[in-house]
Image: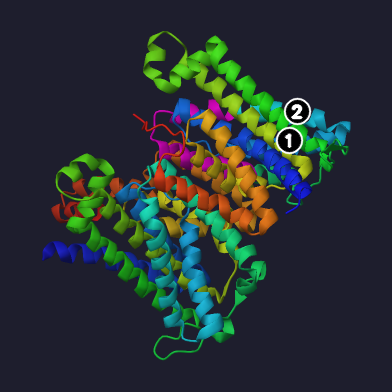
Amino acid sequence: MSAQLLISGVIFGLSIGSIFFLMAIGLSLCFGLMRIISLDQLLYYSVGAYITYSLSLKTGSVWLGVLGGLVVAGIVAFAVERLIFRRIYERELTFSMITSFGILIGGIGVIKYFWGVVPRPVAVPMLTQLNIVGTEVPVYRLIIVGIAVLVYAGIWLFLNRTIIGKAIRAGIENVEHVEGLGINVSRLFTITFIIAGALSGLAGGLQAPLIMVDPQMGLEVLAFVFMVVIIGGLGSIKGTLISAILVGQVVSLGSLIYAPLAQMAPFAIMLLILLVKPTGLYGSPLLKK
Amino acid sequence: MMKAFRWWWGLLLAFSLLALSRAFLPLAFVNEVVIFSIYTMGCSFLLGRVGFISFGQPAYLAAGAYGTAFYLFYFGTNPYIGILMGVLSGLVVSGIVGPLFVRLRSDYFALVNLALAVIIYYLMQKVLADITHGDNGLWFLTNIASTPLLDLGKPNHFFIFALLVAVAVWAFYKYLDDSIYGACCLATKINEDKLKFLGYSNYRVRLLAFIIANTTTALAGAMYAVYLGFVSPEITSPARAADPVVVTILGGVGTLYGPIVGAFAYTGMKDVISKLIGNWELFIGFLLVFIMLAGEKGIWGTLQSLLEKLLSRKKAAAGTADNREARH
């Protein structure tokens, strides 16, 4: 394998990993704090992509579209949280999983109603290539990686430096104690859910120029996002980052060696890790109380 | 003796109703209902008895369907052996992944199963496209030889066969429920520490339940393959992953009649609604959310408590005993 192929493969893997990270962090945060598995994050991903498509057609700017996707996905997440999830926080884990799967499937139906089933293309906002050690690398992919790094830093600062973030971290440890301190846990849940949904929307918006936008797009990345979350361990942000990079590289470099490997290899890795540690790399042994 | 007779009575009643519906409903519809109820029984057992929710049932359905399809397309013509092959392949697949999966916590279990379904989808659609013909699927309707007594190539004969299989599967699960093993399954759902204390291995109980349930699912897949005469990767598409879970919940989790009632209601609604609006996902998604929020007892669960009230008002002691029997 030549060095040029390797470099572009690594960059490609990093950008895929960044998208996975942005989506998986929502699932992971929701599990950590609210003890729910929110499969509907995949819906906000498609919503973000479709809003990006529509806005970039209207205004001509993809970046504006991505921003719009982020905002709309956050609003949809807010509505879903208020209408549905508030009623089921107290229930067992599988309950939230079934309900959110229903929201996901129903939401795909709504998307089909508004945009139809035909796949839509989104223009790549930056076509310039950057030269890294003699290899032409698309700048857009580097920007995706940069945004993911910024988001990770932002989330880290938010969780460690702000009062709300600290309350969220305390809530991940023990919700009852946080409630006992007089912090409005219900509002905390809503904020976390909106952040999760908005980040999924951002992932969709960033991914939109790289693929065709179609209603089933959420289901297509579903397996990979799950693998990222499972390998990293539910509820751990650091674990999510590491496993997102890992899965991204495996998908990208695997496809350089043998194309079908890209889909199968992460699954094999996931099985191996689960064999050694059934809760993933950084997963907490916590169960829902 | 009397007890045994009573539950047979319920069984015969349920299936004779189903057989009767053949007279005034289209054959394709009742065939679909019967196969679907077999498909759901495995999922219902996992969810209601062992407490495992699996969004990966299509993976095992596909294992059964492709086991049958490979045999009928490449090797033989006898549909019975084809179905046997499908069941065997389901047994092999669940035997391989089972020991890995049942060690997991229930949340990880559901995610891993769904990932498996997607992986099998890719496997059948792209990786093994030389053998499975990718999205075009395998067509082998003309390969199916006619067999004496029950000719599975004919839909009306197939219906009788499917009904017999469904009765057998149902009776098997009923038997499991009343056995010590069934009690162990419930115990591993409710209190695994206590079960361990009694000297049973949670792992073994779960593994056996996993294999039984998914072999049943593979049987349904094999029957789909023979009935439709073709198999494509669409059978394990992630968009359909929720179907058995929806039907299980629709019918009532953990009840024995639930899968039949649920399959009937679901297939009926699907037929009616897909004629009215093309947007099937919209409906099923919101139906699922609605059922979850409105109370997860399901159709049969609600009916059952209504029936019990009605019968106890009449002071028909035999009737209540029968219903109580049906619940266990």
Front residue (pair B7, B62) = B62
SS at mark 1 in the image: helix
From the viewer's side, name the closer residue of B326 and B312: B326
Q: Is residue B36 above or below residue A218?
A: below
Mark 1 or 2: in front is: 1
Residue B129 to residue B256: above or below: below
Left or right for B40, reference B308: right
Three-letter code for the amino acid on which mark 1 is drawn: Gly
As drawn, B103 above or below A186: below
Give the CA separation, mark 1 to mark 2: 9 Å
Figure check: B158 above or below B267: below
Q: Which residue is mark 2?
A: A68
Q: Residue at x 48, y 89 (%)?
A: B146
Precedes in sequence: disc 1 or disc 2: 2
Is residue A32 something one can see in this rendering? yes
Q: Can residue A84 be seen in the rendering of this structure?
A: no
Disc marking residue A12:
none
Categorize mark 1 by other alpha carbons within 10 Å: few (<14), some (14-19), many (20+): many
> Which residue appears at 74% of the width and 43% of the height?
A7
For the point 32% across and 56% down, the residue is: B207
Where is mark 1, residue-wise?
A205
Answer with the quarter of the image where residue A132 lies: top right
Residue A111, image x and y in percent?
69, 43
Q: Chain of mark 2?
A: A
> In the image, which residues are magenta?
A79-108
